[in-house]
Image: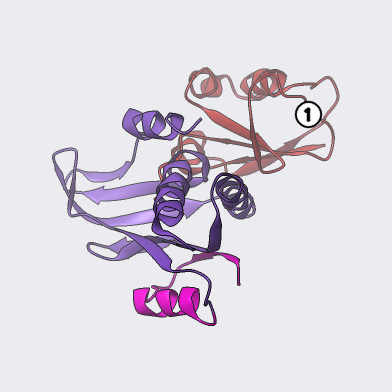
Amino acid sequence: MNNSISIQTKDFSLADEVALLEQDNEIDGAVVTFTGRVRNQNEGLKVSGLFLEHYPGMTELSLEKIITSAKERWNIGRIKIIHRVGQLKIGEQIVFVGVTSKHRQDAFAANEFIMDFLKVKAPFWKKELTEEGEKWLGARSTDNDKAKQWC
Amino acid sequence: MIKIVFFAALREQLDCAELTVPAADIATINQLKQVLVGLNPLWQTYFENKALLSAVNHDMVDGEHSIKSGDEVAFFPPVTGG
């Protein structure tokens, strides 16, 4: 498994994912992982849960393109992206990005690059359940600015 | 025919998940938007929104992108995953 993308409703285990990235992988000395979780507040409002929608087909394709771009820039080994969809509670894991490389710089940079582009290119939408009712999240300009830095 | 799908807040605002329109006389995304507003004038405000994103056959494109019969076109708000 050099690249793997999974869009799923079920939770994932960080330990299992790291084990898969490391299994029979003797050439990579670095494993960098990122996990995103549901927060209990956003923009001053208490949040009690999250619903995640996506565009099946386009989601996978957009993530494959991001992986291809990352592989063109850095010397990286294995990449695993997991993104959950459906109903999620506070504290639950939403997203996982794991990258291996021979040396740490490549995996660090590629992991951040993948997350930055996932945020602005992959067709996922979050609807928050807040104290004021259900609310679709608006795009953050800081996310766009962050992605633009890579060009 | 062109298949059109809507997502997230836009789908709820339009109260429509997907529809199909004849491809005749529709050459670009912008022209398709005009046709959709013609079908339902209440949709005008949503399709004039500059932040609205579009995709053709799962690929993000701009308003000048050409479309043809058999394409799947998607309209959706800015993405907010991660």
Magenta stretch, residue numbers: A1-24
Give the percent coordinates (x, y) of residue B24.
86, 24
Of B39 and A40, the residue lying toward us: A40
The chain holding disc 1 is B
Query: Magenta stretch containing residue A18, yes or no?
Result: yes
Of B8 and A117, the residue lying toward us: A117
Q: Amino acid at mark 1?
A: Ile
* Position of A58 relative to B1 (above/below): below
Left or right of residue A82: residue A71: right
Q: Residue at x 40, y 42 (%)?
A: B80
Chain for colour purple: A
* Position of B3 relative to B51 (above/below): below
Label 1's element? loop
Of A123 and A120, the residue lying toward us: A120
Q: Which residue is mark 1?
A: B67
Quarter of the figure with residue B27: top right
Display colour for chain B: red
Q: Residue at x 63, y 24 (%)?
A: B62
Query: Magenta stretch containing residue A33, yes or no?
Result: no
